[in-house]
Image (spheres, rainbow, N blue to C red):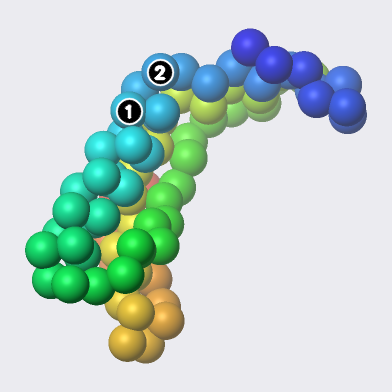
């Protein structure tokens, strides 16, 4: 749990950290195998705010197309429905 200068309190569940780390590690190893530079990864965090407390309890990766510099909107919509 952490308190910011704005007075908000943040609670970050361990699953979020694991998800982000796993996604970055997978993309980085795939890029290295192809001889590419370190990748940029994108994702979405899910949580709620109750009063002055923000609780982040889940996350998922977003698919990024470097050639068009866009995120896959259909993938995001599908994940949000789940």
Q: Which residue is mark 1?
A: 18
Give the residue drawn at x 87%, y 21%. 7
Task: For residue 81, say whether it is visible.
Answer: no
Q: Outermost residue toward the left?
A: 33
Instruction: Name which quarter of the figure residue 15 lies in.
Output: top left
The residue that label 2 is drawn on is 14
User: Can you say which quadrant of the picture contains the C terminus?
Assistant: top left
Find residue 37 and report its horizontal and vertical position in percent: 31, 70
* Number of marks in picture: 2
In the image, 37 versus 47, the foreground residue is 37
Label 1, secondary structure: give it.
Answer: helix
Label drawn at residue 73: none
Image spot of residue 76 (x, y percent): 35, 58
Q: Residue furthest top?
A: 1
> Looking at the figure, which quarter contains the N terminus?
top right
Horizontal side of residue 59 vs 56, given as left or right: left
x then y, percent, for residue 40? 40, 62
In this rendering, the answer to whether 52 lies above or below 59 is: above
Residue at the (53%, 21%) spot, across then down: 12
From the viewer's side, name the closer residue of 42 and 79.
Answer: 42
Residue 42 percent across, percent down from the top left: 42, 57
Residue 32 found in image quarter: bottom left
State the residue in front, 27 or 45: 27
Distance in Å between CA atoms under marks 1 and 2: 6 Å
The image shows residue 44, relative to residue 40, as above or below, that is above
Count residues near mark 1 (Cα–Cα under 10 Å), then give few for <14, some for 14-19, many for 20+. Answer: few
Left or right: where does residue 2 sit relative to residue 17? Answer: right
Marks 2 and 1: in contact by CB < 8 Å?
yes
Q: Is residue 55 above or below residue 77?
A: above
């Amino acid at each position: 749990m952490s308190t910011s200068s704005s007075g908000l309190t943040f609670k970050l569940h361990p699953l979020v950290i694991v998800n982000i780390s796993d996604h970055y590690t997978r993309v980085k190893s795939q890029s290295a195998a192809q001889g590419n530079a370190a990748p940029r990864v994108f994702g979405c965090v899910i949580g709620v705010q109750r009063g002055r407390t923000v609780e982040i309890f889940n996350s998922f990766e977003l698919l990024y197309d470097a050639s068009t510099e866009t995120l896959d909107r259909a993938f995001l919509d599908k994940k949000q429905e789940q």
